[in-house]
Image: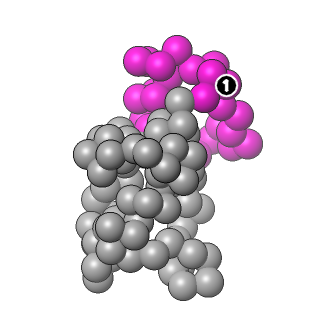
C-alpha cells in the first residue's frame, strides 16, 4: 500500500494497521478511499491535486505516527476536520 508507506515516512517500521489508525484519527481515511486506487495511490503534489486541508490532514497523520513531543502548525483557523484531527492527537499523546 503505497500511500501507507508515504504516511509512515516518519516511522518506517509502523505496521499498516497503525498507519490506518493514525489516518482515521486525522480524518484522512475517507478522502483516501475516494482515490481511484485507495491506499495504493502515490501521494505527490505533481501527481495529485489535494486541497490544503487534505494535505494538512496527511501531515497530521504523519505526525501521529512519529509521535513528536511538540507539533507546530501554521494555521489555527483551518477547516473543522483539521481541528478535530489536532484534538485527536493531543489527547492521548500529550503533544504541545
Mark 1, other Cα within 10 Å: few <14 / some 14–19 / many ≥20:
few
Q: Residue at x 65, y 31 (%)?
A: 71
* Secondary element at image label 1: loop
Q: What colouring style does the render use?
A: one colour
Residue 40 x, y percent position in the rendering: 33, 74
Viewer-side residue, 68 vs 59: 68
Residue 77 x, y percent position in the rendering: 63, 41
83 lies left or right of 92: right
Viewer-side residue, 74 vs 62: 62
Q: Residue at x 28, y 72 (%)?
A: 38
Q: Which residues are magenta?
A: 68-96
Q: Is residue 79 magenta?
A: yes
94 lies left or right of 75: left
Residue 65 x, y percent position in the rendering: 47, 39
For the C terminus, the image quarter is top right
Residue 89 x, y percent position in the rendering: 46, 29
Q: Which residue in the protein does label 1 denote?
A: 70
Q: Is residue 55 magenta?
A: no
Q: Is residue 27 visible?
A: no
Q: Is residue 91 visible?
A: yes
Q: Is residue 31 above or below residue 17?
A: below
58 lies left or right of 40: right
Q: Residue at x 51, y 80 (%)?
A: 48
Total label count?
1
Residue extending furthest toward the front: 13
Amino acid at each position: 500500500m503505497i500511500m501507507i508507506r508515504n504516511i509512515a515516512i516518519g516511522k518506517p517500521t509502523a505496521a499498516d494497521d497503525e498507519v490506518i489508525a493514525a489516518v482515521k484519527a486525522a480524518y484522512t481515511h475517507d478522502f483516501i478511499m475516494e482515490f481511484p486506487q485507495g491506499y495504493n495511490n502515490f501521494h505527490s503534489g505533481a501527481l495529485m491535486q489535494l486541497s490544503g486541508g487534505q494535505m494538512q490532514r496527511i501531515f497530521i497523520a504523519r505526525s501521529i505516527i512519529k509521535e513528536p513531543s511538540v507539533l507546530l502548525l501554521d494555521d489555527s483557523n483551518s477547516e473543522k476536520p483539521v481541528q478535530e484531527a489536532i484534538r485527536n492527537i493531543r489527547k492521548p499523546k500529550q503533544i504541545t
